[in-house]
């Protein structure tokens, strides 16, 4: 479990973190999203004790990271996939890290297999693509078999196949009961992966909610209907809906649920070829919430 409580951090005159507060729960993938400069990386650096906060604290399983005896066994992290010695092989890179924590070669081979790098373990990491470096960074984060993981933009540089693998892999880590914090710029990357999302802006949390809550909040109740009938807009308006042409031959309808629209059209003998509810995406939710974040304003840690 990772707890971030009221962290403030300035760099000169610039306020990077302005009371950042949230917790990352076990058994969930928690997305950490926000625009450039929102404070995601600084928060992660503070959690790892790499930046000292001006106020507030970050705790990993109840302790500051620096006070953990075997930190890699408590929190695995990937901050910068490029941070490796290019002449070392993938396996040697991991062996070096493992030895620093009293871990053996067997664990290194396990994490290489888990991250799909078994076949390239003896290749120089300097020749790896960004996507392969991300996998190597995750292998390193997993070395200590930690209950919590913190990954800064792990989708970065991944091809579509890699993104699909990463989604499944993150889900399986959460399924094993781990707390998984994943930063990203793109809500779309987190759709189908994250259970919970923390949206940050200007150094503070502006929304902290489950994905289901976010999607419900953004669902507009808009229905699209395709029909050849010129009477349809008038019939729907008389039933209390607002119907507007979509521009591609359809009608965009608000004010009535889909079942009621179908019933009204059927009663008037209007045939239609499509009747579809508009489903909000996480991206829709993000845009809506960053415009007006009142509904999911962050609470303090419990
Ligand atoms: N070492 C530093 N010196 C000065 N300013 C810094 C430093 N590190 C971060 N900042 C500033 O703190 C703010 C937060 O930056 P941070 O990198 O944490 O944001 P981010 O959300 O990770 O952004 P991105 O999505 O671009 O990675 C920014 O205004 C950034 O310029």
Image: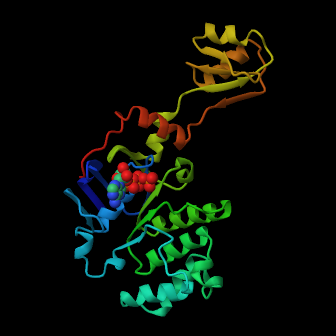
* Horizontal relation, residue 38 to residue 121: left or right: left
* Horizontal relation, residue 263 to residue 125: left or right: right
What is the number of callouts on the image?
A: 0
Q: Looking at this view, is 246 or 19 the one in front?
A: 19
Q: How is the image coloured?
A: rainbow
Q: Residue at x 52, y 43 (%)?
A: 282
Q: Residue at x 50, y 70 (%)?
A: 81
Ligand 1 position by quadrant: bottom left
Q: Looking at this view, is 256 or 279 the one in front?
A: 279
Task: Establish if 207 lies above or below 86.
Answer: above
Task: Establish if 105 lies above or below 13.
Answer: below
Q: Position of residue 135 (x, y in %)?
A: 55, 72
Q: Which image quarter is the N terminus in?
A: bottom left
- Quarter of the image holding residue 155? bottom right
Q: Position of residue 111 (x, y in %)?
A: 52, 81
Q: Residue at x 49, y 60 (%)?
A: 153
- Quarter of the image holding residue 121? bottom right
Residue with the most extreme front position: 12
Task: Establish if 106 lies above or below 299.
Answer: below
Q: Position of residue 104 (x, y in %)?
A: 44, 92
Q: Position of residue 240 (x, y in %)?
A: 57, 11
Q: Is residue 39 visible?
A: no
Q: Is residue 282 visible?
A: yes
Q: Residue at x 74, y 9 (%)?
A: 231
* Horizontal relation, residue 223 to residue 97: left or right: right
Residue with the most extreme right position: 228
């Amino acid at each position: 479990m990772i707890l971030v409580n009221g962290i403030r951090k300035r760099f000169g005159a610039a306020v990077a973190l302005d009371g950042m507060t949230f917790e990352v729960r076990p058994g969930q993938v928690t997305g950490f999203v926000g625009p450039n400069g929102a404070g995601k990386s600084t928060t992660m650096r503070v959690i790892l004790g790499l930046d000292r906060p001006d106020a507030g604290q970050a705790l990993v399983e109840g302790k500051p990271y620096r006070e953990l005896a075997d930190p890699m066994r408590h929190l695995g992290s990937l901050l910068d996939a490029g941070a490796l010695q290019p002449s070392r092989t993938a396996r040697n890179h991991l062996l070096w890290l493992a030895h620093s924590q009293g871990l053996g070669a067997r664990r290194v081979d396990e994490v290489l297999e888990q991250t799909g790098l078994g076949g390239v373990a003896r290749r120089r990491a300097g020749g790896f693509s960004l996507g392969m470096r991300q996998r190597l960074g995750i292998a390193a984060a997993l070395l200590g078999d930690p209950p919590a993981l913190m990954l800064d933009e792990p989708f970065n540089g991944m091809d579509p196949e890699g993104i699909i693998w990463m989604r499944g892999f993150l889900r399986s880590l959460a399924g094993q009961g781990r707390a998984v914090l994943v930063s990203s710029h793109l809500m779309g990357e987190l759709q189908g992966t994250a259970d919970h999302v923390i949206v940050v802006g200007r150094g503070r949390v502006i929304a902290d909610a489950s994905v289901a809550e976010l999607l419900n909040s953004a669902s507009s109740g808009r229905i699209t209907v395709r029909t050849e009938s010129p009477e349809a807009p008038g019939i729907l308006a008389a039933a209390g809906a607002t119907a507007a042409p979509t521009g591609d031959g359809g009608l965009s309808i608000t004010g009535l649920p889909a079942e009621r629209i179908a019933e009204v059209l059927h009663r008037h003998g209007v045939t239609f070829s499509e009747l579809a509810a508009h489903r909000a995406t996480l991206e829709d939710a993000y845009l809506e919430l960053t415009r007006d974040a009142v509904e999911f304003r962050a609470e303090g840690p419990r």
